[in-house]
Amino acid sequence: MIKVRHLKKVFLTPSGQELTVLRDINCDIHRGEVISVIGPSGTGKSTFLRCLNRLEEPTSGMIEVDGMDILSRKTDISMVRRRMGMVFQNFNLFEHLTILDNVTMCPMILLGKSREEAESRGMALLENVGLHDKAGCLPEELSGGQKQRAAIARCLAMEPDIILFDEPTSALDPTMVSEVLAVIRHLASQGMTMCIVSHEMQFVRDVSTRVLFLYDGVVYEDGTPEQIFDNPQKPVTQAFINRIRTFDVTLADSRFDLYGLMGNIRTFCNKYGVSLRTMEKVEHVTEEMLCQIIPFDAPVRFTVDYSEKTSRIHMVFVLENSRGSILSAVPDDSLSLMMVRGMSDSLSEPEPGRICVVI
Amino acid sequence: MRKLRFILIAALLLLDSCSGRRAKDLSGVNGIEDLKGHSVAVSMGSSYDLMLSDIGGIDVIRIGLGELLVAVEKGRAEFCIIDQYQAAMLNMESRGLEIRFRNILKGTAGAGFRKEDSLLCNQFNGYLNGIRGSGEYDRWLDEWKSASDSMAYASFQVPVHDKQPGGRALHVGITINYPYLFLKDNRLTGIEVDLFNRFCERMGYAVDYEIYDFSALIPALNSGKIDVILSHMRRTEERARQVLFSDAYIEGGGAAVCRSADGKAVGVRAGFLERMKESFRNNLVEERRWKLMVDGLWVTIRISILSILSAVMIGIAMCRLRMSRMRVVNLPAKILIDILRGIPLLVVLMLMFYVIFASSRMTGTLVTVMSFGVYYGAYFSEVFRSGMMGVDRGQWEAGYALGLRKIQTFYKVVLPQALSRIIPVLKGEVIALIKMTSVVGYVAVIDLTKASDIIRSRTLDAFFPLILVSAVYLLLSWLAGCGLGLMEHRINPKSRKT
C-alpha cells in the first residue's frame, strides 16, 4: 500500500548547518498491517511518519501510496491526505469547535456529507471511543486522554485507509495512557492499517504485526515484535530493547579522585532512577573493589551497566595486563571480599583481570 | 440616580469656580509697550503673534481664535488681542471683560494669491478699483459697519450670493473669524465673503470655501489646495515672500481685552442651571448652530467607518506581507510598519495632505481616510499578526492532515481562532481611531471637533461645546465597543454554546 524508497530528509538548523535526520529509509507497508516505529529519541521516527503524508517535505527519495508517487508535483496531496488519517502527540483538536463539530466538519466539507449524515456517523464514532456524552463540549473541557480519543474519532470520520499515530500517548498523564491505548488496540483488532510511533514498548509488542527499529537515519532492524523484543540481532537494538544505560571510566592509577568518581556514579544512578539501596550497594562495591581488592599496578577500566527493563546493575572491572586472577590472590576471609559478596547477587572473574559483579 | 446627578453637578460647579483667579491691577496698561511682563493670548500665527514676539518681554500665549476670550475670562492670560470690530460686537461687560486699548497694529488686509497666479490677483485689484470709483465699495462697507455698530447682526439681512454655474471654480481658504467670515444659519457670510462673492459674481467664477486653521492657510495655498486666501490676512514681509497680496480692501486693528477692574461680571450672576440653559441656547439653538454640529457628527461617523474599513484592508495586506517567509517581502513591510508606528498621526496626515497629495485636488476627507487607513493599517496588521501567531502550528497541521487545503484550513480552522484573539485587542485600536479623527480639522475637514471649534470661535464659550463634544465621542466609542463586543461574543465558542 505504501512503498518508501531511499527516503532522505535533511533539516537546515537556524544556524545554517545541515542536519541529516533520515539518511536512507526503505520500507513497505501493506494493507492490514500494524507497523510500529521505535528507536532512540532523535532518530527521526516522527519525521519519517510526517514525511508519509508530506507534513514534512522529504529532501529526496520516493514514496508511493497505492502506486501513486505522492512526491510528484502533479499529485494533489490533499486528496492523498484524506485517505491517511493522522493522530498527533498534542491532539490538535480544533479549539473553537465542539467535539462533535470537530468530528463532523471535514466529512461535511470534503466528503460532501449532509449535516444529519455526518452527525449520526460522528455520534456513532464518539460512542465507539466512549465520548458520547462529551459531544457538546469544547476541547478545553476534556482531559488529555479524552482529547486524544476525540482526535482518533475525528480521524475515523474521514474513513481513512491508514492512520498514522505520532506518539499518541507521549503528552498524556500516565493515568490516561491506557484509555487511549485501548482505543488503538480496538482499532487494530478490527483490521485497521496503522503506523505507530510510540515509546510504549509493551503496547507496541502487543499490538504490532511488524516493528521497525530506526537508528542513524536508516531502518536498522526490522521484524516481528517477537524477533525485535526477544531476540534482537544487532547491538544497538539489544541495548535499546533492554534499555541499558552505561557508565564507563578508565582510572590511570591508585591516586584517582575517589570522591569525584562517587559523585559521578551518584549522578548516573539518579538520572536513570536507580533505587537508593542499589545505589548505595554500587558505591560500596566500587570503593571496596578499587581501594582494597584490585592491586592498582596498571590502569583499570570500570563500567556500570544499568538495564531499565530488569533494574539490574552489571559492574565490570578490568585490570589491564593482569598477571593472574585477582580474586584468588585475596584471602577468602578478607573483610572486603565478604562485604562485596554480601551486597551483590553474584561475583565472578570469568577471565583473569576481569571481575564481574551483578547487583 | 439622583445622588449621581447631584455629585455630577457639584463637581461641575467646583470646576467652574476653581477656574477663576484674582486679577492683578491692570489699569496702568494703555499701550503695546505696557504689555511687557504680562501674559497675552493671541491667535497662533496671526500678525499680532509676530508683533508681540518681536517686542519681547511679553509672555505670549498662542492659542486658537475661539479660546482667546475664554483664556482671559478664566485668568489663563491677563490680556488677549482680538480684532477690534469683533471686540466691539461682543458684550464684554456681561463677561466681566473690558477693552483696554485699541488700534493695535493698525493695518490693511488683502486677499492672498499664489505667486504665479498674478492674473487672478490683477483681476481682483481691478475689481476693487472699479467699485471704489463707482461708490459701491463705500456703500458695501457702510452696510456692514452699520450692521456691526448697531450690534443688530442678528436681524441683519445677510447678502446671499449663489454659486455661479460654469466659469473657473475658485477654492478659497478661510478662517472662521467674526465678523469678517462667519456662519449664519449655517451659511458662510461676513464682510470678506460678501466682497468676494460680489467679485465672483461679476467675473463669473464659481466659488468654493474651505475652512482652515489660520496657520495652515499659506501651506495650503502653496501646495495648490486652495487658490485664494481670504482671511483678513495682513501683509507682512515674511508672508509677502510666499504670497502675492492683493490691494488692501479693509482697514483694521486689534483691541487688547482684559478683565474689568472689579474682575466680576456686571449684573446678577445667573445660577448654574440658568447659565447652562443660556449656553445651550447660545451654542446650539441660535442661528441653528446645532445643524453644524450634526453635520460635523456625520462627517466624523463617515470618516471613522471608512477609515476602519480601509485600515482593516490595508492591515490584512500588510500582515500578509509581514508574515511572508521571503525576506525581500517581509523586511520592507516591517520597516514600513515601524516607520508608521513611530510617527504621530497628525504628522502623517499633514504630510499626506500638504506634501504627498499636495498637487492633487483630493478632498481632505479622502486624504484623511487614506492616512488613517495606512496609519492604523500598520497597527491593525500587528494585531492581526499576533492573533495569527497565537494559533498553534498544530492547528494548521491537523487541518492539512485531514485533507483540507490551505485556504480551507485558514478559513475554517485558523481564522476563527485568530479572530477571538484579535477582536478584544482591535476594540481598543478602533476606539483610539474614532477619537483620533478629531484631528482632521487640520486638513480642512469640518468634523465634530472642528464644528465645535467654529461655534466656539463665534460664541467664545469653551465649556459647553467641549462638554457636548466629549459626550458625543464617548457615545461613539461606547457604541463601537458594543458592536465589537457583540462580534466577540458571537465568535467566542464558549458564549456561543450557551
Image (cartoon, grey):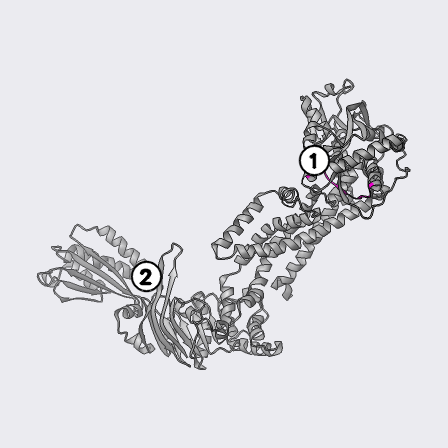
- Disc 2 crowd, CA 10 A, few/some/many (<14, 14-19, 20+): some
Give the position of the C terminus of chain B as an image quadrant.
bottom right
Disc 1 marks which residue?
A: B115
- Left or right side of A65 for B450: right
User: Depth check: B380 or B249 in front?
Assistant: B249
Q: In the image, which residues are magenta?
A: B203-219
Vertical order, B324 against A160 (above or below): above
Q: Give the residue type that dot 1 points to.
A: Lys
Q: Is residue B76 visible?
A: no
Q: Is residue A226 magenta?
A: no
Q: Quadrant of residue B466?
A: top right
User: Which residue is pictured at 86% across the width and 33% down the height?
Assistant: B131
User: Depth check: B464 or A63 in front?
Assistant: A63
Indicate the position of residue B267 as horizontal and vertical percent values.
87, 29
Q: Give the residue type that dot 2 points to.
A: Tyr
* Marks 2 and 1 belong to one chain: no
**Mark 1 residue element:** loop
Vertical order, B88 against B388 (above or below): above
